[in-house]
Image: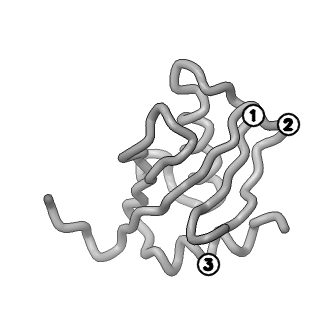
Amino acid sequence: MANKPQDSCTLKVRVQPKASRNQVDGFEDGTLRLRVTAPPAEGKANAGVIALMAKTLGVSKSRLEIVRGHGSRDKVVSIDTLTEQEARRRIDAVAKD
């Protein structure tokens, strides 16, 4: 397995597809909870996850990759340009209570 660059991290994500709105709910038990309006078909929810996380984190969509859980609500997302601490700080700043 290749070493991760210093400014990169992975986050566990739990996704609720077909939600009424796109929303970041914050962390629960170490897992980021997201809601996306896209249905879980043909990769639409995955694209919604990447778009929402990119907007929330202020990074390009190309810097994010779903590395595990393409067909599941539980995913692991790799972030190429942020440390885990910085990613969590940015997410906490916009998360809904």
Neighbours of disc 1 within 10 Å: few (<14), some (14-19), many (20+):
some
Local SS, label 3: helix
Quarter holding residue 10: bottom left
Between disc 3 and disc 1, whose residue precedes? 1
Neighbours of disc 2 within 10 Å: few (<14), some (14-19), many (20+):
few
Residue type highlighted by circle 3: Arg
Local SS, label 2: loop
Identify the residue under disc 3: 89
Q: Given the current orientation, which residue lies at the most extreme front position?
A: 29
Percent across and percent down for residue 70 are 44, 35
Residue drawn where x is 82% and y is 41% of the image = 21
Local SS, label 1: loop
Identify the residue under disc 2: 20
- 3D distance between C-alphas at marks 3 and 2: 25 Å
Q: Given the current orientation, which residue lies at the most extreme left position?
A: 1
Identify the residue under disc 1: 37
Neighbours of disc 3 within 10 Å: few (<14), some (14-19), many (20+):
few
Residue drawn where x is 82% and y is 64% of the image = 96
In screen coordinates, is 59 left or right of 37?
A: left
Residue type highlighted by circle 1: Thr
